[in-house]
Every structure is written in C-alpha cells, then in structure tokens.
Image: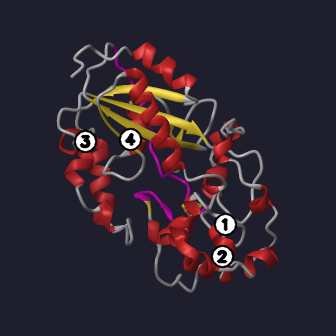
C-alpha cells in the first residue's frame, strides 16, 4: 500500500489534463451536522418519493468511513456536460452518452495515473455528492439546491474518489453554505423551503417513476427530465458548451421530430439510446412520457 501523502497540486493538474473542470480535496470526516439534519428532515418529509435507496444506508451517507473503511481523503471532481446542440424533448444532461460510464472511466484513469488507492463513485452509492462538491470547494450551492462550478455553472456532472491516502493540503468551501430553497416555489412547487419534493418534480416523474404518471402532470418542453430550474438558476449564464464529445447528441437524436417521437418503435429506441442515460426510463417509460407530452 502507498502511504505517501497525496500530492494535491499534482492530482489537480492530472485531473485537468483528463478534462475535469474542477477538482477539490477534503478530509473524509462525517458530513457536517447542518447538512445531516437537513437530509434527515428531507427523508422524514417523504420528499424522496419512491426512491427507497435514499432511505437505505443513511448513516453510511453521513459517515464516509462506513462506506469505505480506511478512507482518509475525499476528492470531488466535475465534468462539464453542456452540449453544443440539444434535442429539445430531452434534458440537457442526457443528450449524449451515459455520464455514469464516462465519469467512472475518467475517475479510474485518474486513480491509476495518480496512484490512488480507494474507490470511486458516480451517483450509484450512498454518497452525498453535492455536499462533497461544496465541502471540497469545487462549487457553490445554488438556491435551488444544485451545485454550480465557477466558470461552468450548474451543468456539471459530479464524481468522487474515496482515497486511502491523506493529502498534503486540503481545500475549504468556496463560500459558507447559504440558505437554499428560498423563493423558488413560484417557479416550481417541487422547490419547497425544506428541499426538493421529488413527488412534484418532473425529472423524478419522467425518469424514476416506474408506474403511471400522476394525472395532473403536464409535460410541455421536455418528455425526459426537466431543465426549468436549471435554466432559471442565475449561474446558468456561466454554462458554456463542453469539449467532451461523449456528451454531444448524435445526428440521429437531433434529427428526431415530434411525429418521429410519437411513432418511436422499440427497435429505433435501442439504436437511438445505445449507451445513453435515457435508457433508465426504459422504452415503456419513455412512451408513457411521450403520450403525456403536449408541446407548445
Ligand atoms: S427539475 Fe423541473 S420539476 Fe423538478 S424541481 Fe426543477 S423546475 Fe421543478
């Protein structure tokens, strides 16, 4: 096992060469109490809807050492996903290849190059990724709960490395955690002062909900995900197109018109969304969404 401390400057330079737009490091301490309290309250309110996995391993989410014994440092990293062009029916983040695959491969590459022992995570383990992005100083909380990376806005994917080495220097948050979720209810009822109520969120409903869509849900601009609060975020003006080819939509996806979506077959779906995050909704889920989509 490599016991030399992690060289923070070298790691950040390596991360930049690999295309990460931000990299920060924090000691692997338990999540701070103010955030832990907010998270527990959010669960008590049932705002996680049917995402039962959010209720599991709560203590593991709050104490990194329970998820990966031996962890000393947490490295938070961001990739810019803002595509150059957009297929309008689909949320900006899902225009290209599945970010889980792209980010995971990139994190592994960084671990190998930097000689890091530990594990890396992309949205699939009990890790509070927005908290760690804030704590590691790579982004600030937007009032709608998103993380915005200076110079890149909130259109970023986040990933984490739980490293078994201590670092020679740690980062601090860019700013104190400001009050979140205030003044957004008029934009969207899902953005309550207590946090995002997934039950009312179109992103949750169109991607995670495996059952019927509530009858009072109306899909207008998008039928997969929702970018309304992302676009309304004041920091969205900092978002600009990524150089990552993997996050650009294919010509076939860009060429899809409303009538093509309404006639989408399972075979076309498979070809169109090969390696895409849109597969999470499955063919049946996407067709269910499209049938509720009333473009204006
Ligand atoms: S993604 Fe859309 S529905 Fe969900 S909180 Fe934001 S604006 Fe509301």
Earlier-in-chain disc, 4 versus 1: 4
Indicate yes or no whether the magenta region holds residue 174: yes
Q: What kind of element bears circle 4?
A: helix
Q: Nearer the viewer, mark 2 or mark 3?
A: 2
Q: Nearer the viewer, mark 3 or mark 1?
A: 1
Q: Quadrant of residue 119?
A: top left
Residue range in magenta is 169-195
Question: Real-space Cα distance between discs 4 and 3?
Answer: 12 Å
Q: Residues within 10 Å of mark 2 (few under 14, many from 20)?
A: few
Q: What kind of element bears circle 2?
A: helix
Q: Quadrant of residue 224?
A: bottom right
Position of residue 3 relative to residue 195, above or below, is above
Q: Position of residue 148 (x, y in %)?
A: 55, 38
The residue under label 3 is 33
Q: Magenta part mainly helix, strand or loop? A: loop
The residue under label 2 is 267
**Residue at x 68% of width, y 42% of height:** 245
Q: Quadrant of residue 187?
A: bottom right
- Camera sees residue 174: no
Position of residue 102 relative to residue 18, above or below, is below
The residue under label 4 is 131
Q: Quadrant of the C terminus?
A: bottom right
| Left-right relation of 105 to 291 | left
Earlier-in-chain disc, 4 versus 3: 3
């Amino acid at each position: 096992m490599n016991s030399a401390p992690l060289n923070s400057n070298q790691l950040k330079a390596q991360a930049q060469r690999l295309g990460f737009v931000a990299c920060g490091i924090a000691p692997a301490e338990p999540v701070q109490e103010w955030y832990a309290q907010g998270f527990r309250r959010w669960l008590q309110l049932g705002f996680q809807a049917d995402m039962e996995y959010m209720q599991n391993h709560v203590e593991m989410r709050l104490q990194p050492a329970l998820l990966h014994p031996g962890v000393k440092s947490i490295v938070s990293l961001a990739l810019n996903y803002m595509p150059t062009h957009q297929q309008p029916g689909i949320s900006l983040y899902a225009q290209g290849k599945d970010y889980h695959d792209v980010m995971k491969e990139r994190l592994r590459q960084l671990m190998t190059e930097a000689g890091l022992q530990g594990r890396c995570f992309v949205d699939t383990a009990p890790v509070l990724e927005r908290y760690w992005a804030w704590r590691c100083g790579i982004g600030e909380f937007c009032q709608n709960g998103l993380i915005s990376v200076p110079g890149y806005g909130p259109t970023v994917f986040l990933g984490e490395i739980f490293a078994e080495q201590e670092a020679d220097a740690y980062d601090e948050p860019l700013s104190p955690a400001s009050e979140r979720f205030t003044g957004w209810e008029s934009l969207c009822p899902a953005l309550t002062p207590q946090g995002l109520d997934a039950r009312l969120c179109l992103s949750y409903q169109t991607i995670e909900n495996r059952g019927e869509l509530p009858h009072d849900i109306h899909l207008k601009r998008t039928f997969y995900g929702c970018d309304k609060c992302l676009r309304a975020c004041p920091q969205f003006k900092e978002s600009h197109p990524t150089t990552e080819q993997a996050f650009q939509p294919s010509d076939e996806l860009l060429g899809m018109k409303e009538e093509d979506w309404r006639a989408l077959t399972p075979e076309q779906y498979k070809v169109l969304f090969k390696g895409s995050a849109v597969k999470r909704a499955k063919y049946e889920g996407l067709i269910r969404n499209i049938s509720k989509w009333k473009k204006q």
